[in-house]
Image: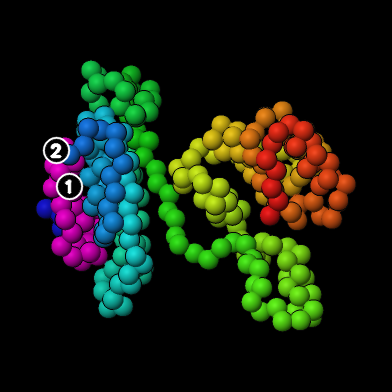
Amino acid sequence: HGTNEFIELFENAKIFPFPKPSSFVKRLLEIGSQGNEIIMDIFSGSGTTAQAVMELNKEDGGNRKFILVQLPEKTDENSEAYKANYKTIADICKERIRRVIKKLDTPEVAKSNTDPDQTNLGLEEKQDNSDHQSQTTNNKFSVFKLAPSNFKIWRSDVIENTEDLEKMMNIFDDQVKPNAEKENMLYELLLKSGYPLNVETAYMPSKEGGYYTINNNETIILLEAIDQTIVDEILKLRPKNVIALDKLFAGNDQLKTNSVLQMKDSEINFKTI
């Protein structure tokens, strides 16, 4: 029963009334999936589908992934959910996923699901002091919200004279909005470059400032710093594309020109923003 599941996870059945039972969704997944699909729920509600996917993966060794879509529908100010600081349905969904992951990662749950004959479970095994193996899930999730761009937009429609043009050019001394965060800029640039949100990314630390490698060094994105040492490091990686914030050059036209020429000589598409 879906309500009983909520009592177990939240200790309060009134957080989300009449949720679907995960056992029902799991049964649908058993019938309609082979174990390696992406399960998408456009009206995710309280996150029943996410719980069903993770629990079924735990039970049968599958590697299903889920995508949940939920509008930030506000909870009623007089509701138990609102009083518990869940201001939207999406907040409830996210917290449920966190609690399910924590539940599946407990030693008791992991031990009860251990099958010595099962291989390729997609689970991490750890040796404890009692001489038996327990398993923890590799479950994790990311949350993405539709939001305005992290970069300023050139407004030619408001330019009527040279004074307006000068103001716009001053605004674009730095194209990045003041409160933009690096991770948000990274994912926006990934999307604009045609990559999916689950593309493999890695952060490469450097003395002056790190950079991101995308899809096994296919693309490199610089959001922190650039100097000749970093350029030399990147050239050794032989990426196809390099994207850098223009402000990182800090007016050093010589460094920028040399970077452009070196990238061109190495047949690397180089773009500044």
* Sequence-earlier tag: 2 or 1: 1
The image position of residue 25, as x and y in percent, is 17, 47
| Magenta stretch, residue numbers | 4-31
Residue named by callout 2: 31
- Give yes or no for contact between labels 2 and 1 (Cβ–Cβ under 8 Å): no
Answer with the quarter of the image where residue 208 lies.
top right
Comparing 40 with 128, the one in front is 40
Total marks in image: 2
Give the quarter of the figure containing the C terminus.
bottom right
Please give the name of the residue rendered at 81% of the width and 55% of the height, measured from the top-left corner.
Answer: 250
Comparing 157 with 175, the one in front is 157
Please give the name of the residue rendered at 23% of the width and 23% of the height, measured from the top-left corner.
Answer: 115
The image position of residue 261, as x and y in percent, is 80, 39
**Which amino acid type is shown beneath numbered disc 2?**
Ile
Q: With respect to residue 94, does 129 lie above or below?
A: above
Magenta segment: does it hold 16?
A: yes
Q: Main secondary structure of the magenta part?
A: helix
Dot 1 falls on a residue whose secondary structure is helix
Q: With respect to residue 94, does 193 lie above or below?
A: above
The CA distance from mark 2 to mark 1 is 10 Å
Would residue 32 appear left or right of 95 to someone viewing this image? left
Please give the name of the residue rendered at 25% of the width and 26% of the height, measured from the top-left corner.
Answer: 114
**Which amino acid type is shown beneath numbered disc 1?**
Val
Residue named by callout 1: 25
The image position of residue 113, as x and y in percent, is 23, 30
Comparing 58 with 43, the one in front is 43
Q: Please, which residue is most extreme toward the right here? A: 254
Would residue 41 appear left or right of 185 to someone viewing this image? left
